[in-house]
Image (cartoon, rainbow, N blue to C red):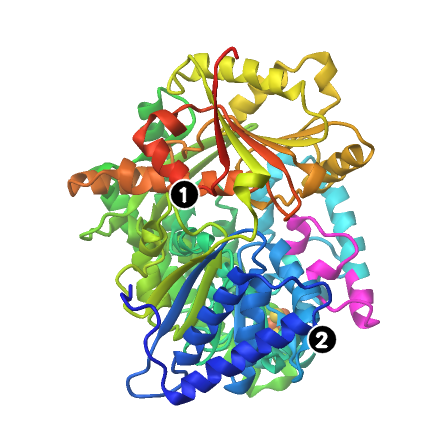
Amino acid sequence: MSADPTPAHTSASAALAQHAMQAFDTMVQRSAAFTPRAGQQAMAQRIADTLARADLGECDKPTQAIAVVQAGTGVGKSAAYASTAVALALARKTRVIISTATVALQEQLMQKDLPALAQTMDEPFVYALAKGRGRYICKVKLERLVGVGTVEDDLFEEDFPAQALGSASREAREERRTRLYEHMATQLAGAGWDGDRDSLAQSPQPEDWGPVAAERHSCTVRQCPSFNSCSYYQARNALAQAQVIVANHDLVLASLGMKTLPDLDNCLVIFDEAHHLPAVALDQFSSAVDLGNLRWLDQLPKAMKEVAKALELELSEDPATVASQLKGVFNTLARMVLDMVHESTGGKDGTLRFAHGVLPDALHEPVSQMGAQAAGLQKALDALGQEVKTLSKEDPNRALQCAQLYARLGPLAPKLASAAETAQLLLEHGEQPLAKWLACTTDGDFLRLSAHACPIVPGDLLKQFLWTQVRGAVLTSASLTSCGSFDYFLQEAGLNHNPQASALEVSSPFDYATQGTLRVAQTVADPKNAAAYTQEMVDLLLEDLARVERGALVLFTSKAQMRAATDALPGVLLDVVLVQGTLSRTRLLAAHSARVEAGLPSVLFGLQSFGEGLDLPGALCETVFIAKLPFTPPSDPVDEARAEWLRRLGRDPFNELVVPTTGIKLLQWTGRAIRTESDRAEVVCYDKRLLTQAYGRRMLSGLPPYRLEQQVAGI
Ligand code: SF4
């Protein structure tokens, strides 16, 4: 990271930065009821300086400039980055991608923040939402299935295996699909629907949507007769006209090297909710193969032969032979996985991780065979697909037939690709090990067996694949620092040794010492003794809950802990507490608001996902109870593999990984308490380690400056 966070501007970049700040000032002046905030001003200035300095497009030695900005709650970060980045993009005749981690923030940007900004800017701009291809209908697939409802290559059935559905249920499903597909086709033809899954009045079930969803592998693109009216390609055309594109981290990382989004070296990029970026990177580069459900492997040779026959094409070899060999390897592997997992778990479901990423010798041969045979079939499938596309190009009269046949092959390609990729990763031996594990889970009468491989250091992936492309970027969130330092996030994001990246923390406009209290209870039980601690914590919590008058939130670290507290609720509190998972999140929050608005006490019980995204201002949340310090359960194979690797290097995974990760979560959890300048709230933490342990005090140092109170048990 840069020692001097704001290197000197050239005169051109200084003028651009000034222009961006004028746009910010105009936005502040023209926005009704806008309160000027020092933190927001500082954030806008850093973004303007950074994005003005970055060189875009073709140049010899381009300057990269990246700003990492932690902006506490209430700063108004989206207004700070959107006003400056949009003004700069317009001035530089380029575009901005705003990438988020959640749909909620995308909606806020599309429906509130960007329309409001557009009203204050002199120059108009167009903004659009980028979604993955799978959110749109494929007309070719829909037309093929209208009136039929039966999907002969129904790979989605693997989630609901055929045996699990009685014939009555199958018929009911086919009837439901027929009605749904007919309704979609009518709506699409009458322009009552744009083909976007999210704009349907009722969201279809995944197993109904899957067979008609657009998908890269089953699309003949320009050779498709519906290309000009294709919902997905129309949405992409709309993106091409937009100066501001709202996307998500998954899409940005999945689109690297493709043409779905603007080239990252020629646009400005804002990563909001940037603390999710490292986890999304790991997810994108991990691979898994399902060894149990192999119906697709029976369908593969059938589909290939049907397509070849229909188009009078020759297959170089009989796919049935290779598919049957591959199926044999899958079955061998499945038996080995079951035996190995059961041997390590004493016959129970579970995972078996391979220490130091070393695959046992016995698995080498079958895994290599899986990789080689899947890759061979993939090649044959690709070659056939290519021939279908060529034929479609040469004979436009057959374009529809070719598109439909191509769509029949499409869903099989990703299955082969994940088998080949997983095999390759499982066999890989690098300086830095991969996390490799087998999993066995029972779902009703069905056994799921799978093999997984995943890189363990997200920073290396982002450095190699993202930051080599991006020129001008901002990463922002309310929780980037951990224990008061950016070090952990910069390392996870692959920016710790990047001299072009600078970090800035702008504080929240809230007066935490006046508005909030952090009470740390001193339990007698050691939090490491789960049973005794949970018992004592639940007793203290119930005493505290009896005093709640308005809204409150209790955050638990595990389902077992939440169940223990729920089971212990006395009758008088049963009508006060709303437990995550008992109703949809929307209905749970609506019930909570209704009770609080009626002047009644209402307490939400939730887990990690409630600790991060909930916005409950005022009376909706006057107290946040934290059941225990939110350490990640030690069973995650990727975390375990990384900790093992650090130990091998003589490093300390607890201090390097566990404490910073927990510190970030704690910052998010406590952040639920004060949401506006007029809020008054208390945070209660029952885990005394926050004060008694050095690592706890490190975490405490990274929290906003609440007034601190200690409470001795029984007082
Ligand atoms: S262009 Fe592709 S996604 Fe669109 S309708 Fe045709 S095959 Fe389907």
Mark 2 CB within 8 Å of ligand 1 = no
Looking at the rendered image, the quarter that the N terminus falls into is: bottom left
| Residue 702, numbered label | 1
Look at the numbered discs 1 and 2 and tell me whether their residues touch, using CB distance below 8 Å: no
Q: Is residue 359 above or below residue 348?
A: below
The answer to which of 420 and 54 lies nearer the viewer is 54
Give how far across and how far down residue 197 sits, in percent.
69, 60
Residue 558 placed where, x, y %? 50, 28
| Residue at image coords 47%, 75% | 48
542 is higher (above) or lower (below) than 502: above
Magenta residues, start to end: 184-210
Q: Which residue is mark 2?
A: 119
Q: Is residue 494 above or below residue 329?
A: below
Residue 127, compared with residue 558, is above or below; it is: below
Front in this rendered view, residue 568 or 167 = 568
Residue at the spot x=61%, y=36% of the render?
681
Ligand 1 location (quadrant): bottom right
* Residue 395 horizontal/vertical position (percent): 59, 86
Amino acid type indicated by mark 1: Gly
Mark before the other along the chain sequence, 1 or 2: 2
Judged left or right of residue 607, residue 197 is right
- Numbered tag placed on residue 85 in the rendering: none
The answer to whether the beta carbon of the residue marked 1 is less than 8 Å from any atom of ligand 1 is no
Q: Is residue 232 magenta?
A: no
Relative depth, front residue between 332 and 361: 361
Q: Sort mark 2 into few (<14), some (14-19) or many (20+) by Cα contacts within 10 Å.
A: few
In the image, 91: left or right of 454?
A: right
Compute the Cα span from label 1 to label 2. 38 Å
Task: Identify the secondary structure beneath mark 1.
Answer: loop
* Residue 512, picture quadrant: top right
